[in-house]
Image (tube, grey):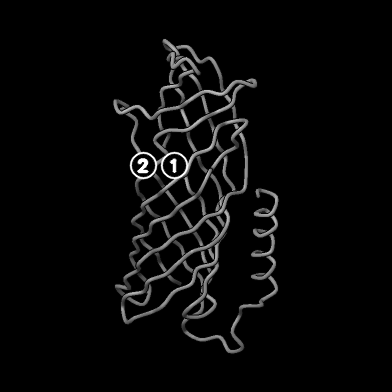
């Protein structure tokens, strides 16, 4: 899947560069915009990870003090009032899990975090000042994991992969230049099951966009 997603990402960039979606006559709906947002990230509550050929269970800790925040930035080009292309960066806070073996013996704290660049098409349906929209693209993810026990780091590993990114959102245009947007994003199985473990990633984001 990751190889195919990488090719899809390249295809998105080539389509934009070649102008396949550029309208024949530029109008006031086209142009560049910048945005930033903050939000909340949720990982799967439980999963499995393979380390050195062994399979372990990771269960999210309810007593974790780590924030579940998410920060994102993006730059986009609006081809017309319905279609845009966005490139951005999504940085999610870590989550702490209790790692156990097959005998359910706790082995330490498993730390899982994700971040990476995004590339996606955005399809919108303007309804006055409101605009529901959807995003479909690729998240070039860097997944970092660590295992800690009694303050000692026992294991650390990092993997890069290309993941499917889908989002649904609602934007509100305050002015011709400023808009706010609320977005829910989902990435299935981010990470590598045999290296870092993989988790579904859900992100709720509130952001603002400035259109030039």
In the displayed structure, would residue 116 be above or below residue 130? Answer: above
Q: Earlier in the sequence, mark 2 or mark 1?
A: 2
Q: Nearer the viewer, residue 176 or 16?
A: 16
Asked if the residue under mark 1 is in contact with the one under mark 2, i.e. CB atoms within 8 Å, the reply is yes
Crowdedness near tag 1: few (<14), some (14–19) or many (≥20) residues, C-alpha within 10 Å? many
In what element is the residue under mark 2? strand
Q: CA distance from mark 2 to mark 1?
A: 6 Å
Task: Give residue 35's quadrant in the image.
Answer: bottom left
Q: Residue at x 33, y 73 (%)?
A: 173
In the displayed structure, would residue 93 be above or below residue 208? Answer: above
Q: Nearer the viewer, residue 164 or 81?
A: 164
Which residue in the rendered view is the most extreme toward the bottom? 25
Would you name the residue on which mark 2 appears?
Answer: 69
Task: Give residue 157's quadrant in the image.
Answer: top right
Which residue in the rendered view is the most extreme toward the front? 103
Q: Nearer the viewer, residue 193 or 180?
A: 193
* Percent x, y of residue 87: 55, 59
Would you name the residue on which mark 1 appears?
Answer: 92
């Amino acid at each position: 899947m990751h190889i195919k997603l990488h090719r899809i990402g390249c295809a998105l960039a080539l389509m934009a560069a070649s102008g396949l979606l550029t309208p024949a006559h530029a109008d006031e709906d086209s142009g560049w915009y910048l945005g930033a947002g903050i939000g909340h990230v949720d990982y799967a509550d439980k999963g499995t990870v393979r380390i050195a050929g062994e399979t372990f269970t990771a269960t999210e800790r309810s007593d974790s003090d780590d924030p579940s925040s998410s920060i994102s930035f993006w730059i986009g080009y609006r081809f017309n009032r319905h279609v845009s292309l966005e490139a951005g960066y999504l940085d999610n806070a870590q989550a702490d899990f209790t790692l156990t073996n097959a005998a359910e013996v706790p082995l330490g704290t498993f730390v899982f975090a994700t971040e990476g660049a995004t590339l996606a098409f955005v399809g919108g349906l303007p309804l006055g000042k409101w605009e529901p929209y959807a995003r479909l693209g690729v998240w070039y993810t860097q997944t970092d994991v660590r295992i800690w026990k009694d303050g000692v780091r026992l294991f650390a590993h990092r993997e890069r992969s290309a993941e499917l990114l889908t989002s649904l959102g609602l934007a509100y245009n305050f002015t011709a230049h400023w808009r706010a947007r609320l977005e829910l994003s989902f990435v299935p199985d981010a990470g590598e099951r045999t290296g870092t473990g993989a988790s579904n990633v859900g992100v709720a984001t509130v952001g603002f966009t400035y259109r030039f």
